[in-house]
Amino acid sequence: MSGNLAIDVSGLTKHFGTKIAVDHVDIAVPEGEVWGFLGPNGSGKTTTIRMLCGLLHADEGQGTCLGYDVRTQSEQIKRETGYMTQRFSFWEDLSIRENLDFVARMYELDDRKAKVNSTLDRLGLVKRQNQMAGALSGGWKQRLALAACMLHSPKLLLLDEPTAGVDPKARRDFWEEIHTLSDAGLTVLVSTHYMDEAERCDRIVYIQNGKLIARGTVAEVIAQSKLFTFIVEGEDVRRFVQRLQDEPGVEHAAFFGAALHVTGLDRDALEHALAPYRNESGITVLEAPPSLEDVFIHLQEQAQ
């Protein structure tokens, strides 16, 4: 990993009328790292991404993206950035090859055919190159979108919920490709709602109501939450959810698979709330490290 910063911005702010969509956000992303953007819908993730790549003008703040001023050099930033939107945004009545050739024309790339060929090969699209984009599954549409983002050999890749609506295998394959690109020096910033995807990132940033409220590695963000989690397992433990949610010190009780996760910031209060269940036949209560999902829910409820 390089010691240089691909993104280095401070005080980034955006208003839409009276609403503050992004509120004085600071981000410093080293070159070659994969960063995850977490936060509920409407938290400001997409707006931040669009300001970074020059699609939106920041009302306040300053800094650089790929060495260019985010407020005055947006055209240079766009030339060296690949941006993948939430929705598939390519032409469904064109083939995969035709879509990529069109994008190559927009970027005014030299030797378009060779670059389209190499991109088709790298993303495993050669056998499907003549298939209409509108006939592709979600996973293949995603792969086409990534190929289009990579045609002009960007230094920064911005991905806005790129795996929404695709199957688990396509998600796994997509992330393997992202890490391959990162190993080659590409910087990646990805917004996601999937906790397993966030755990694949070098660092994560949590945004709520336009404010950056947590950042660091997954382990650091979990530690910063100061959250405690207990796991309750046994037959029909779901019946305890409502009672536990009403107990002092219990911030959240939710069913995960066959177990009940009980979380809060006061360990002694949690122990007291769970003490009666330790005597229940067939029920086990064990303390466990909080999961990232536990922390995500905790941060969201704290903000609300």
Image: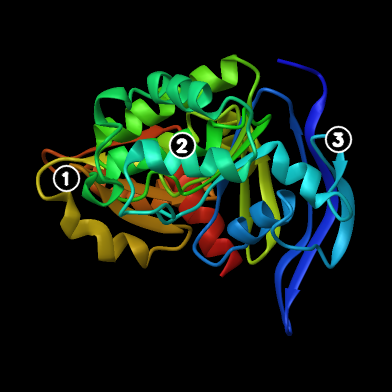
- Mark 3, Cα crowd under 10 Å, few <14 / some 14-19 / many 20+, is some
- Mark 1, Cα crowd under 10 Å, few <14 / some 14-19 / many 20+, is few
Q: Distance between the residues labelled 3 and 1?
A: 61 Å
Q: Do the residues labelled 2 and 1 touch (CB within 8 Å)?
A: no
Residue 295 position in % (x across, y down):
50, 46
Q: Amino acid type of disc 2? A: Leu
Can residue 291 be seen in this snapshot?
A: no
Mark 3 or 1, closer to the camera:
3
Residue with the mark numbered 3:
67
Quadrant assignment, res 247: bottom left
Q: Which element type, helix, strand or loop, lies under badge 1? A: loop
In the displayed structure, 41 sits above or below 274; it is below
Residue with the mark numbered 2:
146
Q: Which mark is residue 262?
A: none
- Mark 2, Cα crowd under 10 Å, few <14 / some 14-19 / many 20+, is many
Mark 2 or 1, closer to the camera:
2
Q: Which element type, helix, strand or loop, lies under badge 3? A: loop
Task: Decide if residue 292 is on the left or right side of residue 53.
Answer: left
- Between 301 and 127, the residue placed more toward the observer is 127
Residue with the mark numbered 1:
280
User: Residue at coordinates 49% horizontally, 44% vertically from top-left?
Assistant: 102
Q: Earlier in the sequence, mark 2 or mark 3?
A: 3
